[in-house]
Image (cartoon, rainbow, N blue to C red):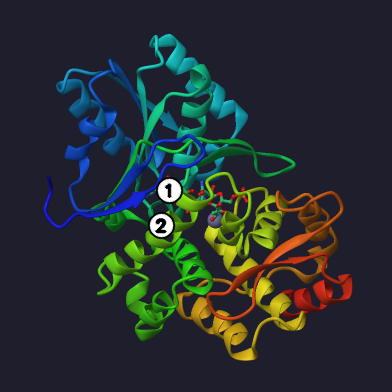
């Protein structure tokens, strides 16, 4: 066992197995234990940016006796397509991958979403392990079993709930992450602060500049606190029948912006704008106090996340939001706050209130 490893438990619900999220340094020694001795083959799915890491992992696993293949996929959202999933299926088919074999997804949230989806769909579901290498991947994407790909019509429209067998968050991986990507992940950290754990906000506000780098004094605590928020929620409601919707705070508008930008924006940046919108919506709907709504602007801005998007795009964004996964029939539904750490769902808001909230966001 590696030193100073934090282990966060995710309970098994809906007939799935429980698993742990490990946070620390040099955790890859844990991988064979998670892969298990029933597996003969392992497929390491990694993005182009992590070619060396993917190859090193493949070599390690081969040395341990597995038939290991590396499957390189494009960086970021370009990997979350049906074509790339089909490319991975082909690689699994050609290597004779069976139900006892294991997929390892190494990379950011886009890669682990894809790798988990490939694992969920291959032979109707094989075991997979997530090795997230971005802040966002560690605190959110790799935990909770939502896997999937995008289509031209919308974000994550095709997918499956398929929890990993384990999640290894090696904090050393964050050192090579470009600052733009590091900061994008802070949007989900800040989300966890607003919906459940305000200490996260206090820690970031105490030194926002330091929060932007892996060398900051609170890095491990911010990551662990955010993972605990996610782990608690998905342990109670894996399949999003209720509580899990709170994790979608800021995502209704965020996903519409991502689609409008043809998935060229980082997810975290879009979610930051979406949280600003959700805060204004909560305020204008009479739910959220001014101070908490204003705090969204100050904390997001302090770490360098965007608050605004194009005003003239509102009609298109509204159309996309109508088919958000939280919508039911013609009923638009948004996660808003009744107060700090008091998330709730606002159903069918008055269109004038929606437009007024966007009036604060649009430029
Ligand atoms: N499944 C979920 O519950 C869930 C939760 C939140 C977000 N997501 C998804 O996660 C995705 C966003 O993830 P992300 O922010 O990690 O972005 P990303 O996966 O697109 O990664 C950003 C970039 O960093 C590169 N990269 C990754 N790790 C690196 C490292 N250590 N060093 C250098 N470069 C590295 C990637 O190749 C990519 O180019 C979105 O698709 C979003 O929908 C899923
Ligand atoms: O885990 C969840 O549930 C979330 O909503 C977390 C989000 O941060 C994440 O972006 C998720 O992929 C969004 O899911 P979707 O169902 O709205 O596509
Ligand atoms: Zn998200």
Helix, strand or loop status at disc 2: helix
Mark 1 residue's CB less than 8 Å from ligand 1: yes
Q: Quadrant of the N terminus?
A: top left
Q: Can residue 191 be seen in this view?
A: yes
Q: Quadrant of the C terminus?
A: bottom right
**For mark 1, what is the residue?**
143
* Label 2 sits on residue: 139
Relative to 42, 340 lies left or right: right
User: Going by the image, does 331 lie left or right of 232?
Assistant: right
Depicted 15 relative to depicted 311: above or below: above
Q: Is residue 344 above or below residue 324?
A: below
> Residue 48: where, in percent of width, then height?
40, 37
Give the image quarter of residue 70. Answer: top left
Q: Given contact means CB atoms under 8 Å apart, are the residues at marks 1 and 2 in contact?
A: yes
Q: Where 126 falls versus 248 (above or below)?
A: above
Front-most of 80 and 104? Answer: 104
- Residue lying at the far bottom of the rendered structure: 291
Q: Residue at x 56, y 63 (%)?
A: 269
């Amino acid at each position: 066992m590696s030193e100073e490893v934090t282990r966060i438990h995710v309970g098994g619900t809906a007939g799935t197995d429980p698993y742990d999220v490990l946070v620390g340094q040099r955790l890859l020694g844990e991988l064979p234990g998670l892969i298990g001795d029933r597996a003969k083959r392992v497929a390491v799915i990694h993005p182009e940016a992590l070619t060396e890491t993917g190859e090193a992992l493949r070599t390690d696993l081969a040395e341990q006796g597995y038939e290991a293949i590396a499957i390189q996929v494009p960086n970021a959202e370009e990997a979350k397509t049906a074509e790339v999933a089909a490319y991975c299926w082909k690689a699994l088919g050609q290597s004779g991958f069976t139900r006892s074999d294991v997929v390892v997804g190494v990379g950011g949230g886009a890669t682990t979403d894809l790798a988990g989806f490939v694992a969920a769909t291959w032979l109707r579901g094989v075991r997979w392990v997530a090795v997230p290498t971005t802040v966002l991947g560690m605190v959110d994407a790799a935990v909770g079993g939502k896997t999937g790909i995008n289509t031209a019509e919308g974000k994550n429209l095709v997918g499956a709930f398929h929890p990993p067998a384990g999640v290894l968050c090696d904090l050393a991986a964050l050192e090579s992450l470009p600052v733009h990507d590091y900061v994008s992940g802070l949007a989900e950290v800040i989300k966890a602060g607003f919906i459940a754990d305000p200490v996260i906000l206090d820690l970031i506000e105490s030194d926002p500049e330091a929060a932007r780098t892996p060398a900051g004094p609170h890095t491990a605590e911010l990551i662990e606190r955010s993972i605990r928020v996610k782990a608690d929620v998905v342990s109670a409601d894996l399949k999003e029948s209720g509580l899990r919707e709170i994790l979608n705070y800021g995502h209704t508008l965020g996903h519409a912006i991502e689609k409008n930008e043809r998935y060229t924006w980082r997810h975290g940046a879009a979610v930051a704008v979406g949280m600003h919108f959700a805060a204004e919506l909560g305020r204008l709907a009479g739910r959220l106090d001014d101070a908490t709504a204003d705090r969204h602007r100050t904390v997001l801005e302090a770490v360098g996340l965007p608050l605004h998007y194009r005003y003239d795009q509102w009609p298109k964004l509204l159309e996309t939001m109508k088919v958000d996964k939280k919508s039911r029939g013609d009923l638009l539904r948004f996660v808003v706050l009744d107060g700090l750490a008091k998330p709730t769902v606002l159903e069918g808001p008055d269109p004038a209130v929606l437009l007024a909230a966007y009036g604060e966001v649009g430029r």
